[in-house]
Image (cartoon, rainbow, N blue to C red):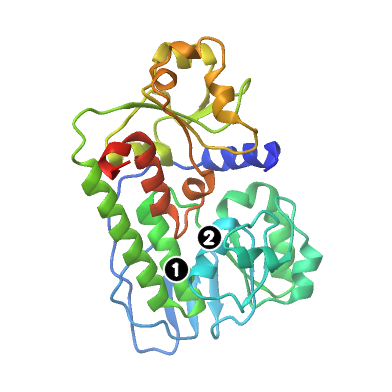
């Protein structure tokens, strides 16, 4: 992965703000021809399969009405794409982001661009709906409006900031595509995996101090308070050595000073990065280096708020507390 893309992902992740987990009203169901749903409502795994037409409110407050289940879909963000494939919409997906690489079938789909997407190409596809993403609005709003002006439905997916909001995102996309039962199953499976991980890490007696970096020196960035990664560390009972708010750039000297028990590397654009981290000046004295606890974790599992997020939680937990997983 190219470094500029990784840094962009870092910027995207920097927008994640940890919010208190809570519940809202259950999804409403009525007998009128058109059902109005909100993208902000809580997950209800017992809801009946969505009927059409359906109206959903997206992340920017636009009401999108779909007369029937979409037969052609364009996805503009890897997390959206993973959700759509998990819902069983392989045949319906006609276009995806240049950086979509999971599942493998995504590699076979027509590419529509990355941060700078090809408006003309998307319009020419005439999809029933385009799933955009809130995190891309800064650079893409003008292009999205051009797509809307061409008469194409654009649904801007909310930038999920925690697990509960990720569940709601999956539920909402399920409603938009007529895949509510499939969405409920995905959510149930994710919750089961989360509970399994939390049950294992609940047995930990000695909390470990952890440093997580998402880019290499000289510009080392790390998540601090009020980030998605902070929520994950809190969930599994680990201490973040970074105490500043949000995402911060941190010096190698400060990392040495903090002396973490575990260093987690969440990027893959640097070859042999584990050895590179270990060989930084002064790092030989860090506990994580002495005890060979510099671990690389797949950044896609933790940065893409979709069906694999629970696996990302498990991978981070295993990196920090391998003993409770029998590793």
- Whether residue 146 sits left or right of residue 292 in the image: it is right
Q: Nearer the viewer, residue 73 or 266?
A: 266
Q: Residues within 10 Å of mark 2 (few under 14, many from 20)?
A: many
Instruction: Residue 122: name its quadrant.
Output: bottom right
Residue labelled with disc 2? 157
Residue at image point 52% right, 43% down: 299
Kindly check if marks 1 and 2 are in contact, taking CB atoms under 8 A apart as contact: yes
How many numbered circles does the render carry? 2
The x and y percentages for residue 66 are 55, 80
Inter-mark Cα distance, 1 to 2: 9 Å
Residue labelled with disc 1? 172
Q: Residues within 10 Å of mark 1 (few under 14, many from 20)?
A: many
Residue at image point 51% right, 77% down: 177
Report the disc number at residue 163: none
Element carrying mark 1: helix
The x and y percentages for residue 132 are 61, 61
Residue sticking out furthest to the front: 327
Which quadrant would the C terminus be assigned to in this image?
A: top left
- Whether residue 319 sits left or right of residue 70 in the image: it is left
Q: Nearer the viewer, residue 154 or 13?
A: 13
The x and y percentages for residue 161 are 43, 48
Element carrying mark 2: strand
Residue at image point 69% right, 61% down: 144
- Whether residue 243 sits left or right of residue 300 in the image: it is left
Sequence-wise first label, 1 or 2: 2
Which quadrant would the N terminus be assigned to in this image?
A: top right
The x and y percentages for residue 297 are 48, 40
- Whether residue 262 sits left or right of residue 103 in the image: it is left
The answer to whether residue 170 is seen in the rendering is: yes
Above or below, 140 against 267 in this view is below
């Amino acid at each position: 992965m190219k470094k500029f893309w990784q840094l962009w992902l870092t910027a995207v992740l920097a927008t994640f703000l940890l919010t208190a987990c809570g519940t809202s009203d259950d999804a409403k169901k009525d007998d009128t021809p058109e059902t109005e749903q909100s993208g902000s409502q809580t997950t209800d795994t017992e809801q009946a399969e969505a009927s059409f037409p359906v109206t959903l409110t997206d992340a920017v407050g636009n009401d999108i009405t779909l007369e029937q289940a979409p037969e052609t879909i364009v996805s503009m963000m890897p997390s959206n794409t993973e959700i759509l494939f998990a819902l069983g919409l392989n045949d319906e997906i006609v276009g995806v982001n240049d950086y979509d690489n999971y599942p493998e079938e995504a590699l076979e789909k027509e590419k529509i661009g990355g941060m700078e997407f090809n408006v003309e190409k998307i319009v020419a596809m005439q999809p029933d709906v385009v799933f955009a993403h809130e995190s891309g609005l800064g650079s893409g709003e003008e292009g999205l409006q051009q797509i809307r002006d061409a008469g194409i439905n654009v649904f801007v997916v909310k930038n999920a900031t925690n697990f509960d909001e990720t569940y709601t995102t999956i539920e909402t996309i399920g409603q938009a595509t007529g895949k509510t039962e499939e969405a409920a199953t995905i959510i149930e499976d994710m919750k089961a995996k989360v509970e399994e991980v939390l049950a294992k890490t609940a047995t930990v007696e000695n909390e470990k101090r952890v440093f997580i970096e998402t880019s290499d020196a000289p510009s080392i960035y790390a998540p601090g308070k009020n980030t998605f990664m902070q929520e994950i560390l809190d969930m599994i009972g680990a201490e973040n050595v970074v105490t500043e708010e949000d995402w911060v750039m941190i010096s190698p000297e400060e990392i040495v000073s903090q002396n973490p028990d575990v260093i987690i590397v969440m990027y893959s654009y640097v070859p042999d990065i584990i050895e590179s981290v270990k060989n930084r000046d002064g790092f030989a004295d860090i506990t994580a280096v002495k005890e060979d606890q510099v671990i690389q974790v797949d950044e896609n599992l933790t940065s893409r708020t979709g069906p694999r997020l629970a696996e990302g939680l498990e991978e981070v937990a295993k990196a920090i507390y391998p003993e409770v997983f029998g590793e």
